[in-house]
Amino acid sequence: MTEYTVKEENGCTFVFGALPIDTLGRLTGGYDKTVVLDTDLARMAGANFAWGKPEDLQRAKAQYRESAINRVRNGPKVSELDEESIQWLAVGEQGRSSQAIFWRVNAHLLFPDAKTSMKDTAYPLDPSDLGRCRKLLEQVPSVNERFVQVMGTMAGPVWAGLVERWECLCSTMDREAPGWREGKGTAAETYRLMKEIIAEAEK
């Protein structure tokens, strides 16, 4: 039997424990487009799921920020990380590709005895993914310093292709959607360029 706990707080809903997909749909209001799932808030609160209206989610993130940072700061191996890394782990905007960058770049600090770096080589699939990767590199200088060396040579052919044309991707995205950091604008040309690089690397 699946067990979970639901907590309602300041307009947001948090679920602790495993939740069946059909139940998740029912709890989030089905097709209510004003309700948004937010994995970053869930991570900050130590929950499995979190959702709410965008304005409520932002208020909740401000409320949970300090406790999330303290939880990461008290975790294992954190003494090996700089303050910017701790902040990003706790409250940064994350996705699989940005997490792949972070863990692979920091493998020499966190997993020095491992025969290989982290196995996850997830790469950005669309401009939203690319934006999360770019925010990581902007917010954590120590990761940015090793990004080209590690992801360009140790994370597989797709990452090698993306890194080789990273500056072009970023300049295209900045031109198309100058407000991307705030989630504003569209980046169709950036998306087309990403797909082109990925397809070429996968041949």
Image (spheres, helix red, strand yellow):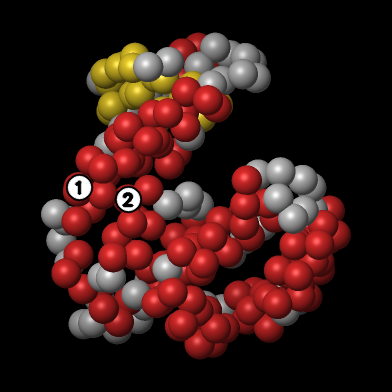
Q: Residues within 10 Å of mark 2 (few under 14, many from 20)?
A: many
Image location (x, y in percent) of residue 118: 38, 71
Q: Residue at x 30, y 35 (%)?
A: 64
User: Could you give the CA–CA distance between mark 2 and mark 1, rounded to whole angstroms?
Assistant: 8 Å
Q: Is residue 106 above or below residue 127?
A: below
Please give the name of the residue rendered at 55% of the width and 83% of the height, measured from the top-left corner.
Answer: 148
Q: Nearer the viewer, residue 164 or 9?
A: 9
Q: Identify residue for label 2.
A: 90
Amino acid type at circle 1 is Arg
Residue indicated by mark 1: 71
| Residue contact between numbered discs 2 and 1, judged by CB atoms under 8 Å | yes
Of the two numbered discs 2 and 1 on the same chain, state the one appearing first in sequence.
1
Asked whether, in this view, residue 60 is left or right of residue 131, the answer is left
Q: Residue at x 44, y 74 (%)?
A: 141
Q: Quarter holding the C terminus? A: bottom right
The amino acid type of the residue labelled 2 equals Ala
Point out which mark residue 201 bears.
none
Dot 1: few (<14), some (14–19), or many (≥20) neighbours within 10 Å? some
Q: Position of residue 7 (x, y in %)?
A: 30, 17
**Relative to the observer, which residue lies in front, 165 or 125?**
165
Decide which of 96, 166 is in the foreground and name it.
Answer: 166
Q: Position of residue 199 (x, y in %)?
A: 77, 69
